[in-house]
Image: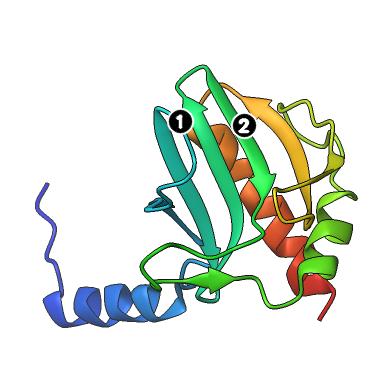
Amino acid sequence: MHYVVDLKWMARFFTFGFLQMKQAIFDIRKSDKSCLEAVEKYVVVYQGQVVLRILGEEMSYEIMTATVGEDFGTVNAYEHPQILVDTAMTLANSFEVELAPRVCRDYDGREYVKICEVHYLSDVYRVAHTLVKKLEARR
């Protein structure tokens, strides 16, 4: 059996599909923060602002809210730090990652939340996705 493919229809279908795809709402990037000591350093960037820091290495990444931006001005800290802290504290064990958020203070006395420790960057994605969705709901 032979199928005739209408290439124009396929082009319209795929173009429409791509137009319907949502743009990613956050990025996970390598961090350029020099004062933090960790084997691997990442940030979660939402709307051009750092919302989370990830420090550690595979099998032991610590996820926390960010209090400052990156060293070279590529992204700034989240503009509403109290909303970020409050939202992070509402995260619950709604997926495979066991969460235990607790408020801490950085070297300048700013509040941040240590959210949890995870094994893989895919776990970071799940935590970041949940946090960003909650931040969007607060708008």
Furthest-top residue in this view: 59
The kind of residue on which mark 1 rests is Ala
Of badges 2 and 1, nearer the viewer stands 1
Number of the label disc, if any, that sits on residue 62: 2
Q: Residue at x 82, y 37 (%)?
A: 94
Q: Nearer the viewer, residue 67 or 130?
A: 67
Neighbour tally class for label 1: few under 14, some 14-19, many 20 plus, Cα within 10 Å: few
Residue 54, relative to residue 33: is it above or below? above
Residue 70 percent coordinates (x, y): 46, 62
Q: Secondary structure at mark 2?
A: strand
**Residue ID at (39%, 81%):** 19
Residue at 82% over, 58% down: 85
Front residue (pair 117, 95):
117
Which quadrant of the figure has residue 100?
top right
Locate residue 105, reporting x and y percent. 79, 47
Q: Residue 105 vs residue 45: left or right? A: right
Say which residue label 1 marks: 38
The x, y position of residue 99, in whole percent, is 80, 31
> What is the number of the mark on residue 56?
none
At x 85% / y 74%, what residue is drawn?
138
